[in-house]
Image (spheres, rainbow, N blue to C red):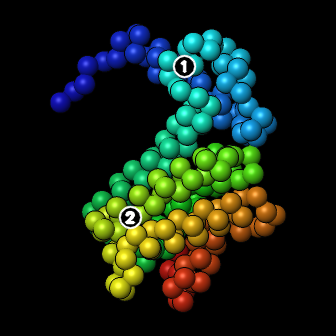
Amino acid sequence: MNNPPLTRHQRRRIQTRKGLIQAAVDLVINKGYEAVTVQDITDRADLGRGTFYIHFKDKEDVVWSAIQGLILELEQEAHQQYKDIIPDYPEYYFLRNIFRYADKNRDLFRVSFGERGSAALTRRVQDLVVAIILNDLQNGLILPEPTSNVPAEIVAQMMTGLITRMISWWLDSPNDYNAKQMAGMIYQALYRKKPPMI
């Protein structure tokens, strides 16, 4: 079924929302989350404060919208990539895809997990990642269900902590590791076997 085309008002509303999100992200990347105000965001987007509050309730809401969109996009890409068959070494490919995506979106991941973000945002990101991993574990969508007696909730929490901490360290510390190397080292440390040679 084809959706009817968007009206001019709907297109303008979408563009306004995107403009506010981009302005917020740019400012947080440059100034840090705590230093940015709603007024800064509306000035950068060249919009009024009233327009901002039509779309978002506060600064955290607009930045969260950007981060949430990025994470859900990564999840959709992974599900599309593996919709027909789960590959051998699924845990490795799961890690590799996350690190590749973080590499392509370094600034936004730094806002999510780095010093320029906020503890509240980091917690929201972690909660979303836990929910995604838990769903994948329970439904076998990307990751197979754990074969040990460890509950899936524990595995999801552990993987989220490990992933978010390693991404934060990788993006903020001087190192020469690429996404594939990061995934391979983490895989080897966790599963005590070498990752696939690809």
Which residue appears at 76% of the width and 67% of the height? Answer: 176
Residue 157: image location, x then y, percent: 49, 68
Quadrant containing the N terminus is: top left
Question: Mark 1 — residue?
Answer: 53
Q: Is residue 133 visible?
A: yes
Residue 77: image location, x then y, percent: 42, 52
The total of numbered circles placed on residues is 2
Residue 116: image location, x then y, percent: 74, 46
User: In the image as oriented, which residue stretches furthest toward the bottom?
Assistant: 192
Observer-nearest of 121 and 104:
121
**Amino acid of disc 2:** Leu
Within 10 Å of disc 1 (Cα), the crowding (few <14, some 14-19, many 20+) is few
Which one is earlier in the sequence, the residue at label 2 or at label 1?
1
Q: CA distance from mark 2 to mark 1?
A: 33 Å
Closest to the camera, between mark 2 and mark 1, is: 1
User: In the image as oriented, which residue stretches furthest toward the right?
Assistant: 174
Which residue appears at 59% of the width and 84% of the height? Answer: 189
Which residue appears at 55% of the width and 79% of the height? Answer: 187
Observer-nearest of 97 and 49:
49
**Amino acid of disc 1:** Tyr
Q: Is residue 74 visible?
A: no
Which label is found at residue 152?
none
Within 10 Å of disc 2 (Cα), the crowding (few <14, some 14-19, many 20+) is many
Residue 83: image location, x then y, percent: 30, 59
**Does residue 192 sit above or below 3 in this rendering?**
below
Which quadrant holds residue 166? bottom right
Which residue appears at 44% of the width and 73% of the height? Answer: 154
- SS of the residue at dot 2? helix
Look at the numbered discs 2 and 1 and tell me whether their residues touch, using CB distance below 8 Å: no
Q: Is residue 48 left or right of residue 192?
A: right
Q: Is residue 115 left or right of residue 25?
A: right
Question: Mark 2 — residue?
Answer: 134
